[in-house]
Amino acid sequence: MLQLPPQLTHTTASACLLDLGAVLPAEPAGVVVSASGLGRFDSAALAVLLSLRRQALGLGKTFAVTCLPQRLADLARLYGIAELLPDHVGSAALK
């Protein structure tokens, strides 16, 4: 399981994406990203999640997110991308 950092904003997004993207190929066929420790974030967190999703799908893996903070889930719904970030617990990982 991949873990998002406690802070994921525009200033930290590139480094986070590089770090998580580097270990993504070693993840099992069902990639799950945990946002349980995410405390401070902006819309860049969604960009990181979408990029990780794209990379995972490109590797033939499924992708899901767990423990997405309510504010970030609301932002994803507002942007119309919530269905691209399926909840690992609540639904099957979608391709």
Image (cartoon, helix red, strand yellow):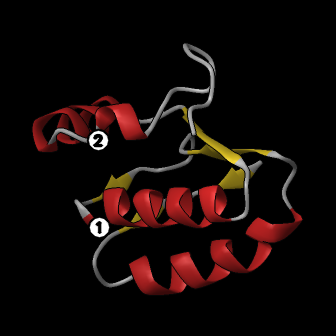
38 or 15, nearer to the observer: 15
Question: Of callouts 1 and 2, which one flags the residue occurring earlier in the amino acid sequence?
Answer: 1
| Circle 2 crowding by C-alpha within 10 Å: few under 14, some 14–19, many from 20 | some
Q: Amino acid at mark 2?
A: Leu
Q: Secondary structure at mark 1?
A: helix
Query: In which image quadrant can residue 36 be found?
Result: top right
For label 2, the residue is 72
Q: Quadrant of residue 74?
A: top left
Outermost top residue: 90
User: Is residue 43 shown left or right of residue 54?
Assistant: left
Residue 92 drawn above or below residue 13 = above
Which residue corresponds to the image point at 57% horizontal and 40% vertical from the top-left? Answer: 95
The residue singled out by tag 1 in the image is 44
Which label is found at residue 6? none
Percent of width and height locating residue 39: 41, 50
Amino acid type, mark 1 = Ala
Cα separation between marks 1 and 2: 10 Å
